[in-house]
Image (cartoon, grey):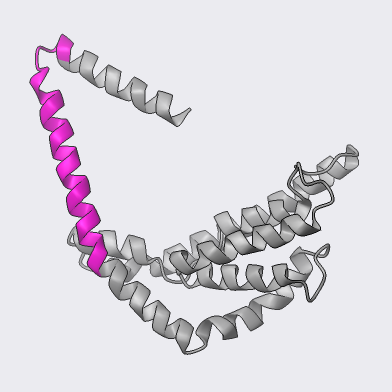
Amino acid sequence: MVNYVWLALMLLGILAAGLNGRIEIVTKAALEGAQLAVKTAFGLIAVMAFWLGVMRIAEQAGLVRVLAFLVRPLVRVLFPSVPRDHPAVGAMVMNLSANILGLGNAATPMGLIAMQELQRLNPYPDRASDAMCTFLALNTACLTLIPSTVIGIRALYGSAEPAAVVGTTIFATACGMTAAILADRFFRGVYRARGDRLC
């Protein structure tokens, strides 16, 4: 669907430029956009390397383990169908902890492991289980304490205070995570009332 939207935008842009007799600006805008994308990508490398390095040090220092200890009770409440000592619990805890600290690269492998372990518990392998849906919602809308990518982009484009978004990001992601949990619980109740499973 997104591809169709992009195609429509490009065709409309070309049509508008052609109707105004300025078709040459299409090529100019495309090249400028590509140059800006390359500049942004390279500019982010240094910032991302710095923050990922800081987060890696924090991880090696045990911060992720401490956070995992704090998150574990919440995981038990949100995933009552997962046995307490199952490997999926550990993977989910580590994934959520890494997401909270902005360690996207570290969170992805743990998320994949968590999904594999949850699939082992799934009585209907052809459909996602309730626990898998809940974990996906949490993984998508997880609380973030350090938005390193946004900070990097703001720094790249000359923001006077690139880290000024930390407070609002924490608030926004906290609201997003709360909404995801509430939506998960709501739709789970709706589907159970209909005698069906969530996914």
Label tally: 0
Image coordinates of residue 114 in percent, x first then y, are: 65, 63
The quarter of the picture where the C terminus appears is top right
Tell me which segment is drawn in magenta: 18-46
Q: Is residue 149 above or below residue 70?
A: above
Image coordinates of residue 175 in percent, x first then y, are: 57, 59
Q: Is residue 197 above or below residue 122?
A: above
In the image, residue 30 lies in the stretch drawn in magenta: yes
The answer to whether residue 13 is left or right of residue 31 is right
Residue plotted at (65% across, 76% down): 71
Residue plotted at (91% across, 39% down): 195
Q: Which residue is nearer to you in this view: 192 or 116?
A: 116
The answer to whether residue 152 is left or right of residue 60 is left
Residue plotted at (83% across, 41% down): 191
Q: Is residue 70 above or below residue 189?
A: below
The answer to whether residue 28 is left or right of residue 128 is left
Q: Quadrant of residue 91?
A: bottom right
